[in-house]
Image: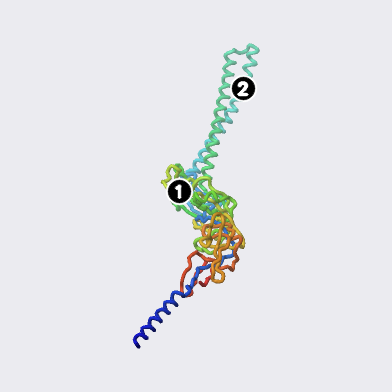
Amino acid sequence: MKKKWIFFIVILLVVLACFKFFNKKEEVDYFTIKPTKGDFANVVVATGEVSAQNLIDVGAQVSGQIQKLFVKTGDMVKKGEIIAKIDSVKQSNEVEKLKAENEILLADLNASEISLKILNSKYKRQKTLYKKNATSKEALDDAYDLVALKIAQISQIKARVLQNQIALDTAMTNLGYTQILSPLDGVVISTIVKEGQTVNANQTTPLIVQIADLSKLEINMQISEGDLPRVKTGMKVRYSILADPNKKFDGIISSIDPAMTTLSDGVKNTQNLQKNEAVYYYAKILVDNSNNFLKIGMTTENEIVIEEVKDAIYLQKNAIIKEGDKFFVKILKDEKPIKKEVKVGISDGFYSEIKSGISQNDDIILNSEAHQTGENNEVSHPGGRNTRI
Protein backbone atom coordinates (compact mmCIF):
# COMPACT_ATOMS: atom_id res chain seq x y z
CA MET A 1 0.00 0.00 0.00
CA LYS A 2 2.85 2.33 0.94
CA LYS A 3 4.62 1.63 -2.38
CA LYS A 4 1.46 2.58 -4.31
CA TRP A 5 1.31 5.93 -2.53
CA ILE A 6 4.94 6.65 -3.33
CA PHE A 7 4.41 5.76 -7.00
CA PHE A 8 1.31 7.95 -7.13
CA ILE A 9 3.18 10.94 -5.65
CA VAL A 10 6.06 10.56 -8.15
CA ILE A 11 3.65 10.46 -11.10
CA LEU A 12 1.87 13.55 -9.78
CA LEU A 13 5.12 15.50 -9.46
CA VAL A 14 6.12 14.57 -13.03
CA VAL A 15 2.74 15.71 -14.36
CA LEU A 16 2.98 19.02 -12.48
CA ALA A 17 6.52 19.61 -13.74
CA CYS A 18 5.49 18.95 -17.36
CA PHE A 19 2.48 21.22 -16.99
CA LYS A 20 4.63 24.04 -15.65
CA PHE A 21 7.26 23.57 -18.37
CA PHE A 22 4.86 23.58 -21.31
CA ASN A 23 2.90 26.54 -19.99
CA LYS A 24 5.98 28.67 -19.32
CA LYS A 25 5.92 31.93 -21.29
CA GLU A 26 8.87 32.43 -23.60
CA GLU A 27 10.99 35.53 -23.06
CA VAL A 28 11.40 37.18 -26.48
CA ASP A 29 14.10 39.81 -26.97
CA TYR A 30 14.74 41.92 -30.10
CA PHE A 31 17.85 43.57 -31.45
CA THR A 32 16.96 47.27 -31.45
CA ILE A 33 18.71 50.49 -32.39
CA LYS A 34 18.04 54.17 -31.92
CA PRO A 35 17.76 56.35 -35.03
CA THR A 36 20.72 58.68 -35.48
CA LYS A 37 20.26 62.44 -35.82
CA GLY A 38 22.74 64.68 -37.58
CA ASP A 39 23.98 65.80 -40.99
CA PHE A 40 23.51 63.01 -43.53
CA ALA A 41 24.86 62.78 -47.05
CA ASN A 42 24.88 60.55 -50.09
CA VAL A 43 28.50 60.53 -51.18
CA VAL A 44 30.82 59.05 -53.79
CA VAL A 45 34.09 57.91 -52.25
CA ALA A 46 37.24 58.31 -54.34
CA THR A 47 40.99 58.19 -53.85
CA GLY A 48 43.03 61.17 -54.96
CA GLU A 49 46.58 62.42 -55.25
CA VAL A 50 47.95 65.90 -54.56
CA SER A 51 49.76 67.55 -57.47
CA ALA A 52 50.91 71.05 -58.41
CA GLN A 53 48.71 73.27 -60.55
CA ASN A 54 51.83 74.90 -61.95
CA LEU A 55 54.89 72.64 -62.21
CA ILE A 56 57.55 73.47 -64.80
CA ASP A 57 60.42 71.34 -66.05
CA VAL A 58 63.29 73.80 -66.47
CA GLY A 59 65.69 72.60 -69.15
CA ALA A 60 68.79 73.72 -71.03
CA GLN A 61 68.41 75.18 -74.52
CA VAL A 62 72.11 75.07 -75.33
CA SER A 63 74.72 72.36 -74.91
CA GLY A 64 77.64 72.59 -72.55
CA GLN A 65 79.00 71.81 -69.13
CA ILE A 66 77.13 72.86 -65.98
CA GLN A 67 79.60 75.40 -64.61
CA LYS A 68 77.61 76.41 -61.53
CA LEU A 69 74.38 75.22 -59.88
CA PHE A 70 72.92 77.94 -57.68
CA VAL A 71 69.99 76.05 -56.12
CA LYS A 72 69.21 72.76 -54.40
CA THR A 73 66.01 70.82 -53.79
CA GLY A 74 63.73 72.68 -51.38
CA ASP A 75 65.04 76.17 -52.18
CA MET A 76 62.53 78.93 -52.82
CA VAL A 77 63.19 80.92 -55.99
CA LYS A 78 61.80 84.06 -57.60
CA LYS A 79 60.90 84.50 -61.24
CA GLY A 80 64.02 85.53 -63.17
CA GLU A 81 66.43 84.27 -60.49
CA ILE A 82 69.47 82.45 -61.86
CA ILE A 83 69.33 78.69 -61.27
CA ALA A 84 72.36 77.37 -63.14
CA LYS A 85 75.12 78.53 -65.47
CA ILE A 86 76.47 76.61 -68.45
CA ASP A 87 80.06 77.18 -69.60
CA SER A 88 79.64 80.03 -72.10
CA VAL A 89 83.06 80.12 -73.82
CA LYS A 90 81.74 78.62 -77.07
CA GLN A 91 78.73 80.92 -77.20
CA SER A 92 80.80 84.00 -76.31
CA ASN A 93 83.32 83.24 -79.06
CA GLU A 94 80.51 82.85 -81.57
CA VAL A 95 79.12 86.25 -80.61
CA GLU A 96 82.51 87.95 -80.95
CA LYS A 97 83.14 86.27 -84.30
CA LEU A 98 79.83 87.44 -85.72
CA LYS A 99 80.33 90.95 -84.38
CA ALA A 100 83.67 91.12 -86.21
CA GLU A 101 82.11 89.82 -89.42
CA ASN A 102 79.38 92.40 -89.07
CA GLU A 103 81.91 95.22 -88.78
CA ILE A 104 83.70 93.99 -91.91
CA LEU A 105 80.44 93.86 -93.84
CA LEU A 106 79.43 97.33 -92.70
CA ALA A 107 82.83 98.65 -93.78
CA ASP A 108 82.40 96.99 -97.21
CA LEU A 109 78.94 98.48 -97.46
CA ASN A 110 80.24 101.95 -96.64
CA ALA A 111 83.06 101.66 -99.19
CA SER A 112 80.66 100.40 -101.85
CA GLU A 113 78.27 103.28 -101.26
CA ILE A 114 81.15 105.77 -101.63
CA SER A 115 82.23 103.98 -104.80
CA LEU A 116 78.66 104.19 -106.09
CA LYS A 117 78.66 107.96 -105.65
CA ILE A 118 81.88 108.22 -107.66
CA LEU A 119 80.51 105.97 -110.41
CA ASN A 120 77.30 107.99 -110.51
CA SER A 121 79.31 111.17 -111.00
CA LYS A 122 81.30 109.59 -113.84
CA TYR A 123 78.11 108.36 -115.46
CA LYS A 124 76.55 111.84 -115.30
CA ARG A 125 79.70 113.36 -116.85
CA GLN A 126 79.66 110.78 -119.65
CA LYS A 127 76.00 111.54 -120.21
CA THR A 128 76.72 115.28 -120.53
CA LEU A 129 79.62 114.65 -122.90
CA TYR A 130 77.51 112.31 -124.99
CA LYS A 131 74.87 115.01 -125.46
CA LYS A 132 77.66 117.26 -126.78
CA ASN A 133 78.95 114.46 -129.00
CA ALA A 134 82.17 114.58 -126.99
CA THR A 135 82.16 110.89 -126.09
CA SER A 136 81.01 107.64 -127.60
CA LYS A 137 77.87 105.66 -126.89
CA GLU A 138 80.05 102.76 -125.79
CA ALA A 139 81.74 104.87 -123.10
CA LEU A 140 78.36 106.01 -121.83
CA ASP A 141 77.08 102.43 -121.65
CA ASP A 142 80.21 101.29 -119.81
CA ALA A 143 79.71 104.00 -117.20
CA TYR A 144 76.06 102.96 -116.77
CA ASP A 145 76.99 99.27 -116.40
CA LEU A 146 79.51 100.10 -113.67
CA VAL A 147 76.81 101.95 -111.72
CA ALA A 148 74.33 99.07 -112.09
CA LEU A 149 76.98 96.54 -111.03
CA LYS A 150 77.85 98.53 -107.94
CA ILE A 151 74.16 98.83 -107.00
CA ALA A 152 73.85 95.02 -107.25
CA GLN A 153 76.97 94.57 -105.12
CA ILE A 154 75.56 96.91 -102.48
CA SER A 155 72.31 94.89 -102.42
CA GLN A 156 74.30 91.71 -101.86
CA ILE A 157 76.29 93.29 -99.04
CA LYS A 158 73.10 94.54 -97.38
CA ALA A 159 71.64 91.02 -97.56
CA ARG A 160 74.80 89.62 -95.98
CA VAL A 161 74.65 92.27 -93.25
CA LEU A 162 71.04 91.28 -92.50
CA GLN A 163 71.91 87.58 -92.53
CA ASN A 164 74.88 88.18 -90.24
CA GLN A 165 72.77 90.28 -87.88
CA ILE A 166 70.24 87.46 -87.57
CA ALA A 167 73.07 85.03 -86.78
CA LEU A 168 74.45 87.50 -84.24
CA ASP A 169 71.05 87.86 -82.56
CA THR A 170 70.76 84.06 -82.38
CA ALA A 171 74.26 83.78 -80.95
CA MET A 172 73.50 86.41 -78.31
CA THR A 173 70.29 84.56 -77.44
CA ASN A 174 72.25 81.32 -77.07
CA LEU A 175 74.73 83.15 -74.88
CA GLY A 176 71.81 84.26 -72.72
CA TYR A 177 70.62 80.65 -72.56
CA THR A 178 73.83 79.71 -70.74
CA GLN A 179 72.27 81.41 -67.71
CA ILE A 180 69.22 79.34 -66.77
CA LEU A 181 66.59 81.44 -65.01
CA SER A 182 63.51 80.50 -63.00
CA PRO A 183 60.32 80.99 -65.04
CA LEU A 184 58.13 81.44 -61.92
CA ASP A 185 58.02 82.05 -58.19
CA GLY A 186 58.12 78.66 -56.52
CA VAL A 187 60.11 75.90 -54.86
CA VAL A 188 62.73 73.63 -56.40
CA ILE A 189 61.17 70.19 -55.98
CA SER A 190 63.79 68.23 -57.91
CA THR A 191 67.39 68.80 -59.02
CA ILE A 192 68.31 66.62 -61.97
CA VAL A 193 71.93 67.58 -62.79
CA LYS A 194 75.16 68.20 -60.90
CA GLU A 195 77.95 70.73 -61.37
CA GLY A 196 80.42 69.55 -63.99
CA GLN A 197 77.84 67.46 -65.83
CA THR A 198 77.58 68.01 -69.60
CA VAL A 199 74.16 68.50 -71.15
CA ASN A 200 73.32 68.05 -74.82
CA ALA A 201 70.52 70.22 -76.13
CA ASN A 202 70.77 68.71 -79.62
CA GLN A 203 68.90 65.64 -78.40
CA THR A 204 65.99 65.60 -75.94
CA THR A 205 65.86 68.89 -74.03
CA PRO A 206 68.01 68.17 -70.95
CA LEU A 207 66.20 68.73 -67.65
CA ILE A 208 67.99 70.83 -65.04
CA VAL A 209 65.44 71.28 -62.21
CA GLN A 210 61.71 71.09 -61.57
CA ILE A 211 60.03 74.10 -59.98
CA ALA A 212 56.47 74.20 -58.63
CA ASP A 213 54.23 76.81 -57.07
CA LEU A 214 53.33 75.01 -53.83
CA SER A 215 50.90 77.72 -52.72
CA LYS A 216 48.35 76.46 -55.26
CA LEU A 217 47.86 72.72 -55.53
CA GLU A 218 45.21 70.42 -56.94
CA ILE A 219 43.81 67.04 -55.98
CA ASN A 220 43.25 64.59 -58.83
CA MET A 221 40.47 62.24 -57.73
CA GLN A 222 39.93 58.98 -59.62
CA ILE A 223 36.21 58.62 -60.33
CA SER A 224 35.01 55.21 -61.49
CA GLU A 225 33.08 54.92 -64.73
CA GLY A 226 29.97 53.84 -62.79
CA ASP A 227 30.04 56.86 -60.47
CA LEU A 228 30.94 59.45 -63.12
CA PRO A 229 27.34 60.30 -64.23
CA ARG A 230 26.53 61.40 -60.66
CA VAL A 231 29.59 63.63 -60.25
CA LYS A 232 29.37 67.25 -61.47
CA THR A 233 31.60 70.31 -61.36
CA GLY A 234 30.78 72.59 -58.45
CA MET A 235 29.97 69.72 -56.07
CA LYS A 236 31.28 69.90 -52.52
CA VAL A 237 34.07 67.51 -51.51
CA ARG A 238 35.29 66.54 -48.05
CA TYR A 239 38.82 65.15 -48.08
CA SER A 240 41.49 63.97 -45.67
CA ILE A 241 45.08 62.81 -45.95
CA LEU A 242 46.44 59.45 -44.82
CA ALA A 243 48.70 61.11 -42.26
CA ASP A 244 45.70 62.64 -40.45
CA PRO A 245 42.50 60.85 -41.56
CA ASN A 246 40.35 62.41 -38.82
CA LYS A 247 40.98 65.97 -40.00
CA LYS A 248 38.60 66.95 -42.79
CA PHE A 249 38.99 69.68 -45.38
CA ASP A 250 36.41 71.12 -47.76
CA GLY A 251 36.80 71.68 -51.48
CA ILE A 252 34.85 72.13 -54.70
CA ILE A 253 35.18 70.13 -57.93
CA SER A 254 36.65 72.59 -60.43
CA SER A 255 36.80 70.32 -63.49
CA ILE A 256 36.32 66.78 -64.75
CA ASP A 257 38.60 65.42 -67.46
CA PRO A 258 36.80 64.42 -70.67
CA ALA A 259 38.94 61.31 -71.16
CA MET A 260 40.01 58.42 -68.94
CA THR A 261 42.98 58.77 -66.62
CA THR A 262 45.29 56.78 -68.88
CA LEU A 263 44.77 59.32 -71.68
CA SER A 264 45.05 62.27 -69.29
CA ASP A 265 48.37 60.83 -68.10
CA GLY A 266 49.47 60.32 -71.70
CA VAL A 267 50.28 56.67 -71.07
CA LYS A 268 48.24 54.81 -73.66
CA ASN A 269 45.17 54.93 -75.85
CA THR A 270 41.90 53.04 -75.58
CA GLN A 271 43.10 50.28 -77.91
CA ASN A 272 45.65 49.21 -75.27
CA LEU A 273 43.04 48.66 -72.54
CA GLN A 274 42.89 45.12 -71.21
CA LYS A 275 39.54 43.40 -71.16
CA ASN A 276 37.59 44.07 -67.95
CA GLU A 277 40.14 46.70 -66.89
CA ALA A 278 38.55 49.34 -64.65
CA VAL A 279 38.10 52.78 -66.20
CA TYR A 280 38.55 55.96 -64.16
CA TYR A 281 38.32 59.69 -64.83
CA TYR A 282 40.04 62.58 -63.06
CA ALA A 283 37.96 65.12 -61.16
CA LYS A 284 40.03 68.00 -59.84
CA ILE A 285 39.88 70.15 -56.70
CA LEU A 286 41.87 73.40 -56.61
CA VAL A 287 43.45 73.90 -53.18
CA ASP A 288 44.88 77.02 -51.53
CA ASN A 289 48.03 75.67 -49.88
CA SER A 290 49.47 78.95 -48.61
CA ASN A 291 50.03 77.27 -45.23
CA ASN A 292 52.18 74.62 -46.98
CA PHE A 293 50.27 71.81 -45.26
CA LEU A 294 49.83 69.58 -48.30
CA LYS A 295 52.74 68.04 -50.19
CA ILE A 296 52.92 66.88 -53.80
CA GLY A 297 52.23 63.16 -54.06
CA MET A 298 50.13 62.87 -50.89
CA THR A 299 47.20 60.43 -51.06
CA THR A 300 43.77 61.77 -50.15
CA GLU A 301 40.50 60.07 -49.29
CA ASN A 302 37.64 62.06 -50.76
CA GLU A 303 33.89 62.12 -50.22
CA ILE A 304 32.03 63.84 -53.04
CA VAL A 305 28.71 65.07 -51.68
CA ILE A 306 25.95 64.15 -54.15
CA GLU A 307 23.09 65.05 -51.78
CA GLU A 308 23.15 66.33 -48.23
CA VAL A 309 20.55 66.92 -45.51
CA LYS A 310 21.24 68.94 -42.37
CA ASP A 311 20.01 67.72 -38.96
CA ALA A 312 18.37 64.61 -40.44
CA ILE A 313 17.16 61.41 -38.79
CA TYR A 314 18.66 58.36 -40.48
CA LEU A 315 18.57 54.62 -40.00
CA GLN A 316 20.32 51.47 -41.14
CA LYS A 317 18.77 50.10 -44.32
CA ASN A 318 18.35 46.61 -42.89
CA ALA A 319 15.91 48.05 -40.35
CA ILE A 320 13.64 49.30 -43.15
CA ILE A 321 11.01 47.05 -44.75
CA LYS A 322 9.87 47.78 -48.31
CA GLU A 323 6.44 46.67 -49.42
CA GLY A 324 5.56 47.82 -52.91
CA ASP A 325 6.23 51.54 -53.06
CA LYS A 326 5.91 51.98 -49.29
CA PHE A 327 8.43 51.69 -46.48
CA PHE A 328 7.92 50.46 -42.91
CA VAL A 329 9.87 49.93 -39.71
CA LYS A 330 9.05 47.91 -36.60
CA ILE A 331 9.09 49.85 -33.35
CA LEU A 332 9.42 48.03 -30.04
CA LYS A 333 6.81 49.48 -27.69
CA ASP A 334 5.77 47.91 -24.39
CA GLU A 335 7.83 44.84 -25.36
CA LYS A 336 5.73 44.41 -28.51
CA PRO A 337 6.72 45.09 -32.15
CA ILE A 338 4.57 47.72 -33.89
CA LYS A 339 4.76 48.12 -37.66
CA LYS A 340 4.84 51.77 -38.75
CA GLU A 341 5.00 53.41 -42.16
CA VAL A 342 7.85 55.87 -42.74
CA LYS A 343 8.84 58.28 -45.51
CA VAL A 344 12.36 57.61 -46.79
CA GLY A 345 14.66 60.30 -48.21
CA ILE A 346 18.19 60.05 -49.56
CA SER A 347 20.35 56.98 -49.05
CA ASP A 348 24.07 56.28 -49.12
CA GLY A 349 23.63 52.56 -49.74
CA PHE A 350 23.98 51.61 -46.06
CA TYR A 351 21.78 54.15 -44.30
CA SER A 352 18.63 56.00 -45.31
CA GLU A 353 17.17 59.31 -44.26
CA ILE A 354 13.79 58.98 -42.50
CA LYS A 355 11.75 62.09 -43.28
CA SER A 356 8.76 61.18 -41.13
CA GLY A 357 7.16 58.35 -39.16
CA ILE A 358 9.60 57.89 -36.27
CA SER A 359 11.40 59.95 -33.67
CA GLN A 360 14.97 59.87 -32.47
CA ASN A 361 13.92 58.16 -29.23
CA ASP A 362 12.10 55.21 -30.82
CA ASP A 363 13.51 51.71 -30.40
CA ILE A 364 13.71 50.28 -33.92
CA ILE A 365 13.87 46.52 -34.38
CA LEU A 366 16.92 45.82 -36.49
CA ASN A 367 15.55 42.63 -38.07
CA SER A 368 12.36 40.61 -38.11
CA GLU A 369 13.67 37.61 -36.14
CA ALA A 370 12.97 37.42 -32.38
CA HIS A 371 15.74 36.01 -30.20
CA GLN A 372 15.01 33.92 -27.12
CA THR A 373 17.44 34.52 -24.31
CA GLY A 374 17.63 34.47 -20.58
CA GLU A 375 20.51 36.99 -20.42
CA ASN A 376 20.83 40.71 -20.93
CA ASN A 377 22.74 41.60 -24.10
CA GLU A 378 23.76 44.83 -25.77
CA VAL A 379 24.17 45.72 -29.41
CA SER A 380 25.83 48.93 -30.58
CA HIS A 381 24.60 51.02 -33.50
CA PRO A 382 26.22 53.69 -35.66
CA GLY A 383 24.94 56.52 -33.51
CA GLY A 384 27.41 55.45 -30.87
CA ARG A 385 24.75 54.40 -28.35
CA ASN A 386 24.11 50.95 -26.89
CA THR A 387 20.63 49.49 -26.77
CA ARG A 388 19.83 46.92 -24.08
CA ILE A 389 17.95 43.88 -25.41
Q: Position of residue 292 (x, y in %)?
A: 55, 59
Q: How many marks?
A: 2
**Which class describes the residues within 10 Å of circle 1: few (<14), some (14-19), or many (20+)?**
some
Q: Position of residue 1 (x, y in %)?
A: 34, 87
Q: Can residue 292 be seen by looking at this rendering?
A: no
Taking depth in this image into account, of 224 and 326 the one nearest to the observer is: 326
- In front: mark 1 or mark 2? 1
Please name the residue that numbered disc 1 is placed on: 65
Label 2 secondary element = helix
Please name the residue that numbered disc 2 is placed on: 120
Q: Is residue 228 above or below residue 143?
A: below
Q: Is residue 43 above or below residue 365?
A: above
Its colouring scheme is: rainbow
Q: Amino acid at mark 1?
A: Gln
Residue 276's label in the rendered image is none
Task: Identify the residue at the far front of this view.
Answer: 1
Taking depth in this image into account, of 154 and 138 the one nearest to the observer is: 154
**Which class describes the residues within 10 Å of circle 2: few (<14), some (14-19), or many (20+)?**
some
Q: Position of residue 240 (x, y in %)?
A: 53, 60
Residue visible at 47% across and 48% down? Answer: 279
> Marks 1 and 2, Cα distance to the nearest angstrom?
55 Å
Taking depth in this image into account, of 71 and 306 the one nearest to the observer is: 306
